[in-house]
Amino acid sequence: MNIKYRFKQVADYYGLSIRKFEEKCNLGGGNISNIGDGGSVGADKLSKISDNCPEINIDWLLSGKGRMLKPPTSHNEASESSQQHEKKQGQSTIPYNIEIELLRQLLESREELISELRERVKILEERK
């Protein structure tokens, strides 16, 4: 999977065309759509994407390694992410296979968060 395809996945996640995604990120028209199959993206563009799409894992976008979405780092972020997804779900244009994978990633990240919190509780209980 090349970077252009990963951009398409991100745009699909937001229910946007590539052109609308470029607008969302304050990028010039064609910045993404004109990337070649082996193309690259400059740091200035990545910064704009990161600022406008903070839940997207930039490492994944560049390399394809890891997960598309950053795991929530706190209970509040997990709740916000869930609420945003629930709002989008009613008007989703994401293909089912991508939506299923995103939901699996969200579930796994929450399970990891729960596991980390259980470890913290265990450590604190041992300190009593």
Image (tube, rainbow, N blue to C red):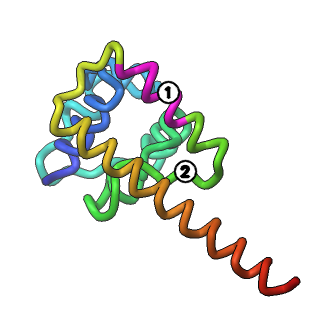
The quarter of the picture where residue 51 lies is top right
Residue in front for this viewpoint, 24 or 96: 96
Q: Which residues are magenta?
A: 81-89
Percent x, y of residue 113? 55, 60
Q: Work out whether 28 lies above or below 54.
A: above
Q: Work out whether 49 lies above or below 18.
A: below
92 in magenta: no
Q: Which circle marks residue 72 in the picture?
A: 2
Left or right, 37 with reference to 44 = left
Residue in front for this viewpoint, 53 or 126: 126
The structure residue drawn at horizontal position 33% and vertical position 18%, both measured from the top left corner, is 20
Residue type at tag 1:
Gln
Q: Which circle marks residue 84 in the picture?
A: 1
The structure residue drawn at horizontal position 88% and vertical position 83%, both measured from the top left corner, is 128
Q: How many marks?
A: 2
Instruction: Report the quarter where the N terminus lies.
Output: bottom left
SS for callout 1: helix
83 in magenta: yes
The quarter of the picture where residue 45 lies is top left
Looking at the image, can residue 31 be seen?
A: no
Left or right, 78 with reference to 100 = right
* Pointers 2 and 1 in contact (C-beta within 8 Å): no
